[in-house]
Image (cartoon, rainbow, N blue to C red):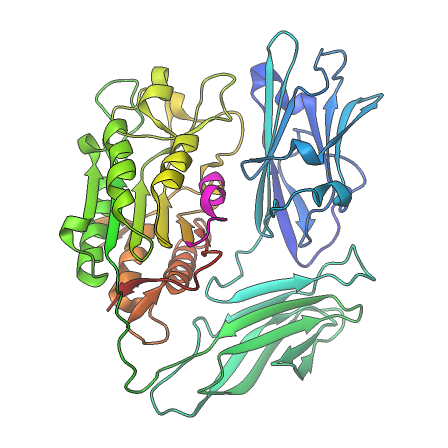
Amino acid sequence: MRTPNLIRQAVLFVSMGLSAQEGSKLFQLWLPDFFDTPFTGANTLVELPDRRIQRLRILVRDAQQRNINPGRYKIFVNGKGLGNVFEERTTPEGTLLVMEPETLRKRPDELFDPRENAIEMMAEDRRGRHYYQNWIVRVNDRRENALFGYSSTVSPDDPKAVPPDLVITEPAIPPFLAANQPSAKIVLKGRLSAGATLRVNGQPALAARQGAVFNFEYAVTVAANQRELVLEAADARGNSRKVVIPVYASTPNAPRIRFAGQKYAVLIGVSRFGATKESPPQLALAASNVEEFARSLEKHGGFKHENIRLLTDEKATLEMVRVAFSDFAAKAQSNDMLVVYIATHGLHDPRPNRGDKLYLALHGTQLAVMDSTALPFSDLEFLLNRSVRTNQCFLIFDVGHELTGDWRFQAGHNLVNNHVLKLFSDKSGWSVLVSGSTDDISVERKMDGEASSLFNYWLAQALRGEADFNGDHVVTAKELFSFVSEKVKTESQGVQQPRYKLATQGGDQSIGVQ
């Protein structure tokens, strides 16, 4: 077997290309930092260690015989084109596209995510025939708590090493010290890789035995002025894994934070797309979930009714959505706040040769004329870039839903969650939350005879104050997003794992004042 025995692992899903276009037979993915041989489209699951991707190679088999000329390739990572970091080489097997660390440094932006990466490869021959395949590379982080921070370091003296495993099972939520409580005793429980040592706040705590994963229990005292607990597992070669647990304390008689600007929201939920056979499958809860979110913003977030543009079903046409962004959303100025929440189908165009085109389905969307009836991701990006003027923007997407019949994307994994997250995650002042990871399907939650999406339910609970970990009567983006991510992942038993990116600038913004 070429898959190494690893403690920390990632998962690489290799999708099949369109069968008519033979994408899975044409392309091979090679990750030379991890394996000595490439993977073809016949592989569906490959495990990788938790290390950053620095080298990437894609072989286009028999490119010359297939009349695929140099320069007729498109490579995307997380929706971003990166042809400028690949060098083309002719080999006996075909054309080899090579990315090395030196060429990767040409990019000023961060291409690869430490948790999940979508890699797409497209080619076209002289006859105009298209070939497509995508891969998903992601760390298996189902044991990680979204409320905590995680990082790993590989020693430069051991570049192919795997950082030791450090899993925290208790506490499940950040510790909180009440007003006038000077300190608290916290019991830490978890698992540690064999042979690793554990430090807590820089001090030696314990060492695991060789040959077996070590289950530990360790008590530590935290003071009211302490902002975090830092746990670090290290091996003898200097590889390490760090977990940061926030510590919150109530401030006696602290004045309530007041938001000085106006708060605006554009909320779009589509359950019914039309009555024809060409319409996407209905979504039973999308419209009602968005309506519930609007009520939560008014009651718990301090949003005025007239500052909420709510578009559901027949009101959520392509034209009305464009107007809502270009007109209404633009009202939010630099010191104001804008919340955008969209619940609908995210779509790959399922028609031949068009799988790389992504859309949001709206009322009136028709399969045969998707370009003029659905909202392309490129148009969504353009509308928001042009209209958003505020430095406090929250974008929330629940667009990963099950598709059936002709709407199913057959040429690979559904990348809508990955791409919508990456579209806006590098914008100053913009925080983005998506309801799941790649291929995740939104889960329903039924309680007391009422149904809601699991994602929307925990959004509402967060705004009601459950995400206010430090008791300051404010729900920040970090509190809300991490709370929703952890609750949805836990209740769905890892089936649905929301992902988020916080604003690159502007601090930890507040979305609700209790």
Left or right of residue 82: residue 184: left
Q: Residue at x 26, y 69 (%)?
A: 258
Q: Residue at x 75, y 70 (%)?
A: 235
Does any portion of residue 403 appear in the rendered image?
Answer: yes
Left or right of residue 255: residue 436: right
**Between 159 and 371, which is closer to the camera in this rendering?**
371
Does any portion of residue 285 appear in the rendered image?
Answer: no
Quarter of the figure with the C terminus: bottom left
Q: How many marks?
A: 0
Which region is colored magenta?
419-429
Q: Is residue 425 magenta?
A: yes
Examine the image and state in which quarter residue 301 appears: bottom left
Q: Position of residue 424 (x, y in %)?
A: 45, 45
Q: Position of residue 132 (x, y in %)?
A: 59, 23
Q: Is residue 348 above or below residue 459?
A: above
Q: Residue at x 24, y 46 (%)?
A: 290
Examine the image and state in which quarter residue 217 appears: bottom right
Q: Position of residue 15 (x, y in %)?
A: 58, 31
Q: Position of residue 316 (x, y in %)?
A: 23, 33
**Between 438 and 53, which is closer to the camera in this rendering?**
53
**Between 57 and 502, which is closer to the camera in this rendering?**
502
